[in-house]
Amino acid sequence: MEGLIPYSINVRGKLLDLSEPKVMGILNVTPDSFFCDSRKQTEEDIRARVRQIVDEGAHIIDVGAYSSRPGADNVSVEEEMRRLRFGMKILREETADMPVSIDTFRADVAKMSIEECGADIINDISGGTLDANMFKTVAELKVPYILMHMKGTPQDMQANPQYEDLMAEILYYFSEKIQKLRDLGQKDIILDPGFGFAKTLDHNYTLMHHLEELKVFGLPILSGISRKSMIYKLLGTTPSDALNGTTVLNTLSLLKGASILRVHDVKECVETVKIVSKTLGN
């Protein structure tokens, strides 16, 4: 697709080509994720959700066992691991080959997920700020790492987020953390600007407007805006009514260079990628 960096990531010895945008389907094995329809806790529900993600054409499954919505309750390491072990066992029974990312900011959970559960990618909302061992752990595991921008914790990040210069701070944040990861030998890094994490409504739309500036790092960009408050608060609706807005923002993300779209609604996102790609002559 026009404007995309020709880039591949190494997933357990196989190259995942990101020169065409990839769709990441969300599987939440939590009781309290912000979009209630995404919460899957029983074996039957998890199995059905995995089948849906696969059948609708996703390329990656992102599994979360700790809700990172603003103000979410803290969950113990043991409980997060229990949920992931349960969910990953079912997931791998349904699909042995699809790349799986684990949405966690804890190094011990990351290590367990890769070594015990057959996960492939670590998706860290905190960019290593909530666990000092995370960078070292992912570098030792030699797995792709999704580096997200956030300030604070899920419990307080939306209390009063402030920036003197939003994009300057985000670019500095990424430059510093990318260098730390490179110094440890980390090879595959994906950048997630963190829509909805320590950002006001205006911050989120400023970030979307300037998203292509992240291409300066020469790394793939992940956009995760699916059904988030930047859509439904602007429109005065709810997460359940935010699919149309999600499609609009996914389209803008693609036009601004995103390589991965993290979504609840896989079928609609796959169609979006296909239409945008065709429009740009790819």
Image (cartoon, rainbow, N blue to C red):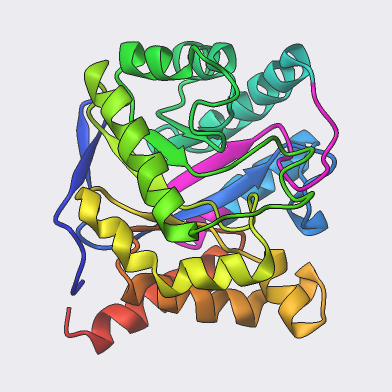
Quadrant containing the C terminus is: bottom left
Residue 86 spot, x, y in % from top left: 69, 23
Q: Nearer the viewer, residue 239 or 117?
A: 239
Q: Nearer the viewer, residue 82 or 167?
A: 167
- Whether residue 86 is in magenta: the answer is no
Residue at image x 73%, y 39%?
A: 154
- Provide the major secondary structure of the magenta segment: loop
Q: Is residue 108 above or below residue 151?
A: above
Q: Is the residue 243 above or below the residue 155 in the image?
A: below
Q: Is residue 60 above or below residue 94?
A: below
The residue positioned 63% from the left and 50% from the top of the image is 197
x, y percentage for residue 187? 22, 28
- Residue at 51% across / 71% down in the picture? 206
Q: Which residues are magenta?
A: 53-75
Magenta span includes 57: yes
Query: Where is residue 81 shown, x and y percent of the image?
Result: 68, 17
Q: Residue furthest left?
A: 6
